[in-house]
Amino acid sequence: MAVRNNFEIIMVADAKLTDEECQPVFEKFKELIKEGGGEVKFENSWGRRKLAYEIDKKQHGIYHLLYIEGDGELIDHLRRQFGYDENIIKYFVIAVDDLKKAHDDFESLKADPFKNANLVKESMGA
């Protein structure tokens, strides 16, 4: 049996999609996780946001976060599928120790982004 780990997955869809068009894209990946033996524990839609840098001449994307349990084979499969999907312009897969804490940290960031940005600066000595 494969070792199950915790991951935070950030998917960035093309901002040209409407909300109705991007939902099936995100649902497809949730289904792939389920089919691959993984489990989505938490989910957050962050909506349309300006990208940190331009990707394929695009300046905005639709962000969606998944907090999952799964094994390395599932993550490899998801990475391949992200590459095949023309609607996903960027993705990030981050291993995390505690899914609940990662989810709660994101929720607090959404609630007060300036407070959290200052905490990051302070912790980095900036």
Image: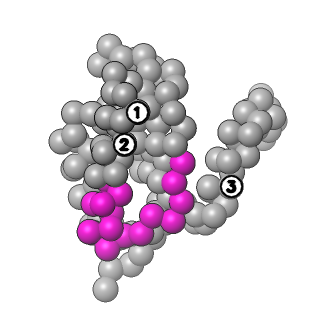
Question: Horizontally, is 90 left or right of 52 in the view?
Answer: left
Is the Cβ of the residue at disc 1 closer than 8 Å to that at disc 2? yes
Question: Horizontally, is 100 left or right of 3 in the view?
Answer: right
Mark 3 vs mark 2: give the one in front: 2
The image position of residue 37, as x and y in percent, is 31, 73
Q: Residue furthest front?
A: 20
Front residue of this view, candidates 5 and 48: 48
Front residue of this view, candidates 67 and 45: 45
The span shown in magenta is: 29-44
SS state under label 2: helix
> Whole-Å distance between the Cαs marked 1 and 3?
25 Å
**Any magenta on residue 30?**
yes
Name the residue carrying label 2: 23
Residue 19: mark in rendering:
1
Looking at the rendered structure, the kind of residue marked 3 is Asp
Q: Is residue 99 above or below residue 119?
A: below
The image position of residue 98, as x and y in percent, is 61, 66
